[in-house]
């Protein structure tokens, strides 16, 4: 895939001072509309004696409070929608085991912008009109595949939309249809690699050149493994369901951070404890404000992802700031296949089905990249008796069903001894992520 | 080419603009739409120095020009064609045009004025036919053409038009705006305030919507044409459903 990999050069390479002016204009308009149309923001900002005209520069944004996922869930279903419902042409739902679901809405213009953002992400990965793009995303109440398909159509690529899950079928399609690009989650890429090897095809049996992956953290060792096993160049992209995914940020061919689409998003990094803004280069929590979103404007939304920002020029020519690849979270949550797992939320289910004092930990990445194992300490009363074993087996089945339904992910339950739930320091762990070699 | 950053302005104690930021890129037509009293004309007045900005910055061609005097801004390349034409009714068409070159009268401007006038007469043949006629006796459309031609005599790089279609028959308004498009195609940059939002958005590249002195929407002209809020408030689209 030769040539410059920039979808909208006028926007993506605009001078920084022009970009800052554009951001200020869009921020002020967003704040004016949000205050007018969304009661949550009016009520939240009132004690601060805040009026949108008070934001005279981008730095003034830091005076405003942050918005959390919990806030959005409290506004379920339409508390954060800034337009009449008849102007909303698409409704997605970001699920939430802990806080509850959040509705994500789009107007026609929002959808057009989303397609543009997705096109930028995909073009940065080298996708063009000659590409045959296979997009195996599961459909459901949140359909990330929709964004990628829209972006691919805008580019003029050939799109093969296949349902997720059946990896053998996906490999067959990839082979028969000569797919050149895979757009998926890293877990899918690894499952496909395993299937490829089982089918004795190998990367030379395919026409794949590129994998555009995202939706869950995947460290450099995982990238190296995917590239080797699939014979592709693997690039990262990042998004937040309630803001945009795909479309918030993506790697270019330099692979030195992910360019944030700053004409549509204002990115900050804050200290997760003090919530004070941090300068470029410092690591902290990514906070995002949408610019130009009509149906669902977000003001200083806490993503929970840890990264740093850089405004240094990139060799690709884009002037947009870059974020480092987000691998860590600010809390003990873990993201698997786009789902945020809160160990403490799982505790309610475990304790209701097992015992109030039962301890557990969540282990991700054990048997596969997206493997979720919940290790539950054996309740003393069930240990060592025949009846106890029967009870444990039933509990295990109940837990697997309940948690799989709540999370939207298959989970394995392992009943273990209490002592194995502590780390080397003797402290009980809520979550262990083995995908980066951790644990 | 033109940057406004968080501009505040007021008429006495009455705030008229609150934190208005916008920009006009070289060679663009940018339109500012809004209801009567929203702050459209006030924005142009602040840019052209007729009204003082109380805070914020204005930049023109990367120079800070906040609160420059009107004549200094004209010499810098900004022309403001005000609402209501405001031609000098007791003077001829030709004299009105010559006055448009007044800011350039010292130096080469005086010598260039006849050629510039000839160029305007070529652009607006109706004015050529009426060059010796008193401006006050022209029709509304002809006066609007004269106001525009007079503005062009200052050889502006940024042309600001305040409600040029006001009081004009629709066909005349369309012809006028077509002329504005031609000027853009020739390289002129235009900031257009227009009561006929649909007509303005049809020729503009981008637009801003202003309400009670604040910018509430910005985007490409097509985005704004497609925006239901704009359609409802400014383009005459209504809804039959009771709950809407």
Image (cartoon, coloured by chain):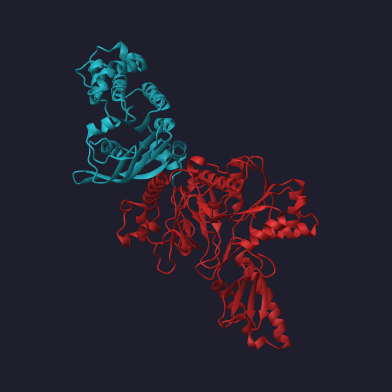
Chain colours: A red, B cyan
Return the x and y of residue A57 as percentages of the image width and height.
34, 52
Q: Is residue B152 visible?
A: yes
Q: Is residue B156 above or below residue A311?
A: above
The reply to whether residue A43 is visible in this rendering is no
Q: In this rendering, would A50 be left or right of A86?
A: left
Question: Which residue occupies 57% across, 51% down?
Answer: A254
Is the residue A123 above or below the residue B102 in the image? below
The structure residue drawn at horizontal position 55% and vertical position 67%, both measured from the top left corner, is A97
* Residue A60 left/right relative to A378: left
Nearer-the-camera pick, A199 or B230: A199
Nearer-the-camera pick, A378 or A423: A423
Residue A279 position in % (x across, y down): 41, 60
Residue A303 position, x and y percent, is 49, 61
- Residue A352's quadrant in the figure? bottom right
Q: Quadrant of the C terminus of chain A?
A: bottom right
Residue B42, given in percent of the width and then of the height, sits at 27, 38
For residue A379, what is the image quadrant?
Answer: bottom right
Q: Residue furthest right?
A: A200
What is the quadrant of the N terminus of chain A in the image?
top right
Front-most of B157 and A241? B157
Q: Report the number of numbered marks.
A: 0
Residue A352 vs A106, above or below: the answer is below
């Amino acid at each position: 895939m030769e040539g410059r990999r920039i979808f909208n050069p006028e926007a993506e390479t605009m001078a920084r001072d022009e970009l800052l002016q554009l951001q200020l204009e869009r921020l002020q308009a967003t704040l004016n509309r949000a205050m007018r149309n969304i009661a949550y923001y009016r009520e939240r900002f009132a004690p601060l004696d805040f009026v949108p005209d008070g934001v005279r520069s981008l730095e003034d944004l830091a005076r405003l409070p942050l918005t959390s996922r919990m806030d959005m869930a409290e506004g379920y279903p339409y508390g954060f929608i800034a337009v009449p419902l008849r102007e909303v042409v698409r409704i997605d739902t970001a699920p939430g085991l802990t806080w509850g679901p959040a509705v994500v809405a789009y107007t026609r213009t929002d959808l057009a912008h989303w397609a543009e953002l997705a096109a930028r992400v995909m073009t940065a990965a080298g996708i063009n009109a000659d590409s045959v793009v296979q997009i195996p995303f599961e459909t459901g109440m949140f359909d990330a595949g929709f964004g990628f398909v829209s972006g691919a159509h805008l580019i003029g690529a050939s799109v093969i939309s296949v349902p997720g899950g059946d990896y053998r079928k996906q490999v067959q399609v990839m082979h028969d249809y000569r797919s050149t690009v895979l757009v998926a989650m890293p877990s899918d890429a690894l499952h496909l690699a395993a299937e490829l090897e089982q089918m004795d095809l190998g990367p030379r049996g395919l026409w794949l050149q590129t994998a555009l992956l995202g939706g869950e953290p995947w460290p450099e060792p995982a990238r190296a493994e995917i590239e080797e096993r699939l014979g592709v160049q693997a690039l990262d992209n990042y998004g937040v369901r309630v803001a945009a995914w795909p479309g918030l940020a993506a790697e270019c061919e330099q692979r030195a951070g992910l360019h944030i689409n700053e004409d549509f998003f204002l990115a900050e990094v804050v200290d997760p404890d003090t919530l004070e803004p941090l300068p470029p280069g410092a690591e902290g929590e990514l906070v995002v404000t949408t610019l130009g979103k009509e149906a669902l404007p977000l003001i200083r939304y806490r993503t929970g992802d840890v990264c740093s920002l850089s405004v240094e020029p990139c060799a690709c020519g884009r002037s947009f700031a870059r974020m480092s690849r987000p691998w860590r979270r600010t809390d003990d949550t873990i993201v698997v296949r786009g789902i945020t797992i809160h160990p403490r939320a799982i505790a309610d289910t475990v304790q209701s089905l097992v015992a109030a004092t039962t301890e557990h930990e969540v282990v991700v990445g054990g048997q596969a990249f997206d493997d979720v194992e919940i290790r539950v300490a054996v309740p003393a009363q069930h240990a060592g008796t025949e009846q106890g074993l029967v009870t444990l087996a039933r509990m295990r089945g109940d837990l697997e069903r309940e948690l799989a339904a709540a999370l939207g992910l298959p989970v394995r339950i392992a009943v273990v001894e209490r002592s194995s739930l502590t780390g080397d320091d003797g402290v009980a762990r809520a979550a262990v992520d083995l995908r980066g070699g951790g644990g | 080419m033109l940057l406004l950053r968080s501009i505040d302005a007021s008429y006495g104690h009455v705030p008229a603009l609150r934190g208005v930021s916008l920009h006009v890129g070289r060679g663009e037509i940018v339109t500012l739409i809004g209801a009567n009293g929203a702050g459209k004309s006030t924005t142009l007045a602040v840019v052209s120095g007729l009204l003082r900005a109380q805070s914020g910055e204005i930049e023109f061609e990367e120079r800070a020009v906040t609160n420059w005097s009107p004549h200094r801004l004209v010499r810098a390349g900004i022309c403001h064609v005000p609402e209501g034409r405001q031609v000098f009714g007791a003077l001829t068409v030709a004299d009105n045009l010559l006055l448009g070159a007044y800011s350039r009268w010292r130096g080469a401007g005086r010598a260039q004025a006849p050629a510039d006038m000839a160029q305007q007469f070529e652009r607006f043949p109706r004015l050529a036919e009426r060059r010796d006629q008193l401006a006050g006796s022209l029709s509304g459309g002809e006066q609007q053409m004269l106001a525009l031609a007079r503005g062009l005599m200052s050889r502006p790089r940024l042309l600001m038009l305040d409600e040029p279609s006001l009081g004009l028959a629709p066909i005349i308004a369309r012809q006028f705006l077509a002329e504005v498009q031609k000027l853009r195609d020739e390289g002129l940059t235009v900031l257009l305030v227009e009561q006929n939002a649909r007509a303005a958005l049809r020729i503009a590249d981008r637009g801003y919507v202003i309400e009670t002195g604040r910018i509430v929407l910005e985007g490409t002209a097509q985005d704004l044409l497609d925006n239901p809020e704009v359609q409802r408030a400014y383009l005459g689209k209504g809804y039959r459903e009771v709950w809407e």
